[in-house]
Structure formats: C-alpha cells, structure tokens
Image: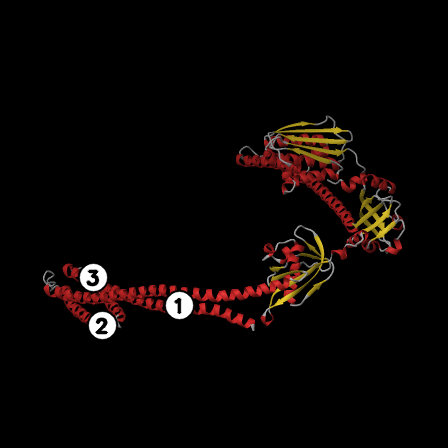
C-alpha cells in the first residue's frame, strides 16, 4: 500500500507539469500558425504589386518603341513593341490569377485590358500608315493618343493604390497578432511558471519526506547488522556503507558514495579470479544470490590484505526489476593464517611449465614438480632420493664440481644442459640454478629450473645450416658469373677480334690496289678501316670490363695498378697506388674476390664519396694479403646504412671476403673520408676453398 501511494505521488509530480507544458506549447503553435498566415498574405500583396509594376513598365516600353518607329521609320525601334505584345497576355493573366480573391480588382483589370486592346488596334493602324508613308510623324502622336495612354496608366495606378492599401492593413494585422502572441507567451509563461513552482514544490516536498523516511529506516536496519554491508545501484556504484564496512575497507562513507564498487571493495578471489566488479555484474545478470566462502582477500585502502568471506544478493524493485546489489562480508583472517611456507612454495613451483626440482649439494632430488614430470617423463616416486644427473644422464657444459664451486661462491649458475628423458629423448634445456643456504645447521639446497629449448636449438642449427647453404649458393653464383665473364671476354677477343682484324686487313689490301683516281672509294675505305679500329678498341674495353686480362696474365698487383689508372683517367680523381714489386702468391679465386672488392670500393667512391683523391695500398702481412683503399670524401655514419638498402654493396664486399676466409673492415665518419681494409689469407686448404671460396 505504501508503494502504491508513492507511485501515485510520483506520477502526479511528473504528469501535471508535463500537461501544462504541452498546453502552452499547443497555444504557442496555434498563434504561430495564425501569424504565419498573415505574413503569407503580405507576401501575396507584394507579389501583386511587383506584377502590376512589371505590367505597367511593359506598357511604357511598348509606347516608347512605337513612338520611336513613328518618328524615325526604323524597324529596329519597333522590336520592343512587338515583343511586348507577345508578353502582355501572359503577364496580364499572371496578375489576374494573383487577384482571383478580389472581384473589384479583377474588374479594374478588365478595364485595363479593354483599354490595352483599343490602344493596340489604334497603334496597328498608325504603324500600317507609317509603313505606307501616309502618316505624318509630327502630328499623329498628339493629344488623342496621349490621352489614351494616360488613362491606362491611371487605371493601373488605381489598381496598385488598392493593393498598397490592402498591404498596409495586412501588415497592421500581422503586427497586432505578433504583439498578442508575445503578450500571451509572457503572461502564460509567467503564470505557468508560478503554478509549476508552487505545485512541484509542494508535491516534491511530500515525495522527499517519504524518500527520507524510507532511507532512514533502511539505513537503521543495515547499520544494526554486525557484518560489513555495502549496497550499489544497477551500475555498480556504491549507494550505502555501514560502519563495519567503513572500518574494514578504510574508506569513509562520504568518500565511497558514488564510487565504483571495484574502487572501494577490492576483493581478490583466488579460485575464480573474479573481482567485486565481476561479482556485482554477475548478480545483476543472473538475479541470484552469489556466495563465496573461501579464498577471498580484501585489499584495504592502505593496501593491507584481509581474508574475508562474503556474499552478494540482488535488490529487487517492483515487477522483479533489479535496481542494485547488496554485498555482505566478514573478517576471517584467523582461519587462513595457519599456512605452511613450504606448501606455498610448492604450489607456486607447480604453476610453471618448466622442469623445477630441488637437489642437495650431492645432486640428490628432494622435490620434483609436475612440469619436470611432463618434460622428462619421470614421476615423483621414481626420482625421489636419486642423483639427478645420473638418472637424467645430464651432459654438462662444464664439470659438475666446477658448477657446485661457482654456486657456493656466487649463489647462482646458468648454462645449457642436455638431459635424457625416460623415453630416450634428448632434451636441451636452459638451466638456472639458485643456492638456498641452510639455516640453523640445515644443509644448503639448490633450486633447479630447466626450460626446454630443444626446438629453439634445432631452429638455430637449421638457421646456421641455411645460412651456410645460402652462402655456398652465392659463392657458386659468383664463380659461375666470373666463368661466364671469362668465357665471353675470351670469345669476344678470339673470335670477334680476329674477324675485325681480318676485315681490316682485307680492306687495307683493297685500298693499296685501287688506283688513285678512285678517290671516293679510297676515302670510304679509310673511314671503314677507322671504324674497324674503333670496334677493336670497343671489344678490348668490353673484354677488360668483363674480365681484365691483366688479372689472369700478370696477377693481382698489376690488375690493381691497371684498374686504378683506368679509374683516374675516366673520373679525374687522383689515385695513388702502392703495390709490392713482386706479385703476391694468391690463387685465382681469392685474387678475383680481392679485385672485385677493389672495384666495388672505387664504384662507391664515385657514387657516394665525392672524393678528390684515393690512396690504394696492397701488401702482405704474415700469411695474409692486406688491401687498403682510403678516400678523402664526405664519409658517413655506419649506423645510417645498417638498416637500409644502401648498405648492400658493403655487405657484398664482406660476403666476398668471408667466402675466402677473410674479412673487411670499414672505418668512416662524416667529413673524414672512408677507409676500407681487406684481409685475405694467402693459403687455404683446397677442399675448404672448393666448398666456400668461389668468387
């Protein structure tokens, strides 16, 4: 019964102001429509005035056009008159339709139209006489025609005066309606405001009193409970806390109100992982009581953890609608303080998937985790008390006694091990050992954590193998390319060169046997011989570019001198070369690789260095050949090229050297030029060279 009274009062508070507002809005809407209608009549009158003015202008233009023609006899003056006669009927009908609601105005328009027809008939006769040459241009347009035109103008002006009068009256009517609407709005708005203020204030007072009484009753009931109570709304925001909840959470009630439940009541459920927010959402959705008795901690405002039991229940309104949740919890810390430290540690160790076990300093197993059982296949009963490295047949990266000595000194050890599982699998693990020194005379123990890295090791081995295969393939491709260059250069030199030489000899033979009287033919033969000489030079240049013969015939030192000379002559860059007087003993593969690296250095000088001078030094240091190429160019930072495609040339140089057992060192800095140092071994076993040293 109490709820029904509250509901009726609430409906009255809402419905009455709404009804008053709707009534006021309806009245204002009616006034607005009436004002809009008056404004439309004013617009209509303006249209009539505009149309009548346009019609009057058309009559004046026709009259002026006709007079110009009568006076001059020029037909061009008559064009506006003819055009006006065509437009007059349509313009007149438009005006007549606009005043269809006024019979008096329509009657005036009939008189205007009759006068217009008489004027047109008269004008037609005058125009015809003028065209026939029988009209006197100085006398025809006198008093009679002027009187007719003035009469038409007077009729149209009377029509406009009537419309102006109508417009003035309609404007006054619209103004009165506008003032009436403004006055009505002010009076009704003020009256409605006063009424709503009095009505709403009175009924809201009653409504507030009832709500306050209900709130005080509910607060008194919940506050008398000896357990902590927190209530929320349907969005999970706190609406009530009793004194017990304030003491447990550490939150004052005035600060906690309207806060999300998870901000104040921080519950950690060890089994479900649910927080207070989750549980409130679950209760709101399921509309059922949720009880959680064990494994729940409350985190207070000052970060203390208190073991609690709690439950959550929905708060129902009318018609079964859930409007909030009430949570009740109590302190049960005493029930959970009796936990054994070793049990906690064992539970934590069981969570990991790594093989975790504990051994003494002799290697005897004292603890064996489920992760170790899953990885190695031995159960806890099978390994208890046994020596770990014996049952697992552990392969250490260093002797076991050295590992124990390091443990005693530093307290930890890390390294890779190989264990043998129960089914015979070899498991590569990353071992992390930590020493726990004994207390009160207890012997020290070692915590062993082994992570399975078998797949990672296999992947690394596969990656190394693939890199070696790729390097061997690249070496093979380099060798094939050099052989192709050598073959093409040889074919060009031996075949094309010989053919060009034979053709030159034949042409020279013909030139010597031709008489001097065949001057044109001799000149053409000389040009052909010169073209053949150019062709021979081009073939030689192509052969040198493909495979310098000096590298195969005279060795690496001579080839470097020749290439440096060609570079200097072509690019106008000073090139200083220092080579040993006697050629170095270097097989063809390494000589070719070193020469190609030298060519790449010169190419980089031209493309990037902007150098004016290059210094080249070839020497022997012990069992290695050393080539140094230095320029005075702009230099660069190696970090700028390490992640860009621009460093592929440098990478190719390093790969060539590494394929022959050598290396390439590059030093450069902005503004200080670049120095490339190449070191290649003099002698490498032929079998090794055949596998990896193919340039």
- Residue 616: x and y, percent? 67, 29
Q: Residue at x 76, y 29 (%)?
A: 621
Tell me if residue 411 can be seen: yes
Q: Quadrant of the C terminus?
A: top right
Task: Name the mark nearer the viewer: 2 or 1.
Answer: 1
Q: Is residue 258 above or below residue 102?
A: above
Q: Quadrant of residue 555?
A: top right
**Are the residues at dot 2 and dot 1 in contact (C-beta closer than 8 Å)?**
no
Numbered badge on residue 24 = 1
Q: Residue at x 65, y 64 (%)?
A: 282
Q: CA distance from mark 2 to mark 1?
A: 43 Å
What residue is shown with label 3?
61
Q: CA distance from mark 3 to mark 1?
A: 56 Å
What residue is shown with label 2?
106
Secondary structure, mark 3, is helix
Q: Residue furthest top?
A: 581
Secondary structure, mark 2, is helix
Give the crowd class for mark 1: few <14, some 14-19, many >=20 residues within 10 Å: some
């Amino acid at each position: 019964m109490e709820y029904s009274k509250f509901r009726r009062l609430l409906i009255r508070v809402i419905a009455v102001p709404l009804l008053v507002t709707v009534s006021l809005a309806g009245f204002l809407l009616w006034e607005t429509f009436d004002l809009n209608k008056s404004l439309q009549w004013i617009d209509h009158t303006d249209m009539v005035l505009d149309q009548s003015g346009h019609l009057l202008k058309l009559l004046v233009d026709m009259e002026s056009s006709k007079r110009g023609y009568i006076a001059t006899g020029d037909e061009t003056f008559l064009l506006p008159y003819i055009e006006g006669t065509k437009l007059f009927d349509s313009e007149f009908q438009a005006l007549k339709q606009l005043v269809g609601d006024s019979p008096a105005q329509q009657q005036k328009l009939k008189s205007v139209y009759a006068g217009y027809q008489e004027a047109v008939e008269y004008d037609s006769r005058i125009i015809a006489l003028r065209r026939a040459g029988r009209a006197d241009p100085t006398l025809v347009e006198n008093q009679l025609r002027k009187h007719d035109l003035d009469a038409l103008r007077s009729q149209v002006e009377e029509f406009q005066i009537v419309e102006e009068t109508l417009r003035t009256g309609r404007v006054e009517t619209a103004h009165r309606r506008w003032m009436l609407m403004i006055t009505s709005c002010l009076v009704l708005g003020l009256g409605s405001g006063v009424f709503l203020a009095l009505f709403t204030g009175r009924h809201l007072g009653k409504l507030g009193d009832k709500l306050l009484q209900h709130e005080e009753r509910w607060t008194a009931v919940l506050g008398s409970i000896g357990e902590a109570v927190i209530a929320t709304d349907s969005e999970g925001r706190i609406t009530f806390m009793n004194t017990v909840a304030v003491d447990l959470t550490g939150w004052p009630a005035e600060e906690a109100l309207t806060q999300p439940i998870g901000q104040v009541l921080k519950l950690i459920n060890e089994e479900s992982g649910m927080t207070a927010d989750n549980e409130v959402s679950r209760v709101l959705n399921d509309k059922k009581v949720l009880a959680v008795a064990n494994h729940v901690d409350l985190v207070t405002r000052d970060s203390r953890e208190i073991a609690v039991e709690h439950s959550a229940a929905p708060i129902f309104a009318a018609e079964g609608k859930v409007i909030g949740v009430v949570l009740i919890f109590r302190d049960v810390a005493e029930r959970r303080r009796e936990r054994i430290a070793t049990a906690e540690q064992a539970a934590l160790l069981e969570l990991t998937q790594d093989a975790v076990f504990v051994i003494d300093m002799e290697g005897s197993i004292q603890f064996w985790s489920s992760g170790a059982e899953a990885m190695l296949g031995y159960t806890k009963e099978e390994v208890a008390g046994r020596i770990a490295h014996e049952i697992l047949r552990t392969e250490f990266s260093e002797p076991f006694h050295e590992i124990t000595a390091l443990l005693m000194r530093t307290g930890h050890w890390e390294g890779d091990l190989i264990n043998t599982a129960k089914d015979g699998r070899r498991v590569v693990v990353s071992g992390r050992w930590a020493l726990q020194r004994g207390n009160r005379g207890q012997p020290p123990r070692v915590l062993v954590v082994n992570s399975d890295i078998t797949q990672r090791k296999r992947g690394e081995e596969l990656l190394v193998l693939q890199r070696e295969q790729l390097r061997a393939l690249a070496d093979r491709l380099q060798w094939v390319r050099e052989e192709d260059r050598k073959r093409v250069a040889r074919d060009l030199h031996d075949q094309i060169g010989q053919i060009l030489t034979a053709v030159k000899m034949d042409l020279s033979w013909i030139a010597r046997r031709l008489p001097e009287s065949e001057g044109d033919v001799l000149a053409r033969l000389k040009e052909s011989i010169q073209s053949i000489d150019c062709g021979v030079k081009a073939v030689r240049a192509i052969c040198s570019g493909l495979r310098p013969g000096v590298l195969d015939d005279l060795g690496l030192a001579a080839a470097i001198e020749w290439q440096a000379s060609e570079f200097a002559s072509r690019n106008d860059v000073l090139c200083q070369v220092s080579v040993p007087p006697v050629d170095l003993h270097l097989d063809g593969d390494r000589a070719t690789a070193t020469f190609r690296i030298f060519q790449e250095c010169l190419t980089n000088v031209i493309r990037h260095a902007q150098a004016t001078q290059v210094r080249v030094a070839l020497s022997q240091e012990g069992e290695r050949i050393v080539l140094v190429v230095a320029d005075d160019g702009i230099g660069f930072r190696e970090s700028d090229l390490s992640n860009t495609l621009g460093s592929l040339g440098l990478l190719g140089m390093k790969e060539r050297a590494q394929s022959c057992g050598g290396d390439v060192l590059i030093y450069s800095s902005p503004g200080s030029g670049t120095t490339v140092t190449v070191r290649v071994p003099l002698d490498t076993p032929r079998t090794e060279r055949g596998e990896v040293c193919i340039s």
